[in-house]
């Protein structure tokens, strides 16, 4: 199971989360309960390794934007342009 931490808790516990990443464990970082980032082992997800999609990470990927992602993104663009 992937750990989930709020942004403030993640900031306060960053050394622990980095140690967990070194041991191969990913952490989803949330903002107001919504997943916004993943702190993951670089050997699994980043440089120096064959990159893989982050969709297997719990709380991300398909479904994150709802059933109609294009409509959701248009709505967000409309909010940003105001």
Image (cartoon, helix red, strand yellow):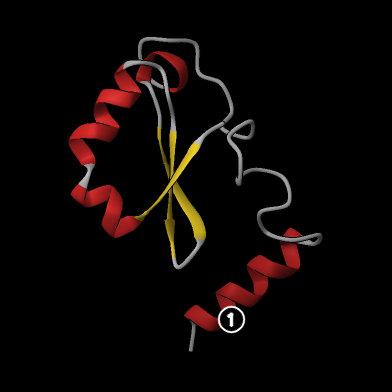
Name the residue at 73% across, 59% down.
69
The number of discs equals 1
Name the residue at 64% across, 66% down.
73
Q: Where is residue 35 in the image (x, y as percent from the top left)?
A: 51, 53
Asked if residue 44 lies left or right of residue 60, the reply is left
Along the line of sight, the residue nearer the viewer: 53 or 22: 22
Asked if residue 6 lies left or right of residue 56, the reply is left
Q: Where is residue 23 in the image (x, y as percent from the top left)?
A: 35, 15
**Residue 68 image-quadrant placement:** bottom right
The residue at the far top in this view is 49
Name the residue at 56% across, 32% down.
54
- Label 1: which secondary element: helix
Q: Position of residue 22 (x, y in %)?
A: 30, 18
Asked if residue 28 lies left or right of residue 7, the reply is right
Asked if residue 8 lies left or right of residue 3, the reply is left
Above or below residue 78? Residue 20 is: above
Above or below residue 76? Residue 31 is: above
Residue at the spot of label 1:
78
Classify 10 Å Cα crowding around label 1: few (below 14), some (14-19), many (20 and above).
Answer: few
Along the line of sight, the residue nearer the viewer: 64 or 68: 64
Q: Position of residue 51 (x, y in %)?
A: 50, 18
């Amino acid at each position: 199971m992937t750990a989930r931490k709020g942004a403030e808790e993640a900031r306060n516990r960053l050394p622990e989360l980095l140690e967990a990443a070194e041991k191969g464990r990913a952490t989803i970082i949330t903002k107001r309960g919504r997943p916004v980032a993943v702190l993951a082992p670089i050997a699994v997800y980043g440089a120096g390794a064959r990159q893989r999609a982050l969709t297997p990470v719990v709380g991300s990927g398909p479904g994150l934007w709802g059933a109609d992602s294009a409509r959701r993104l248009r709505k967000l663009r409309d909010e940003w342009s105001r």
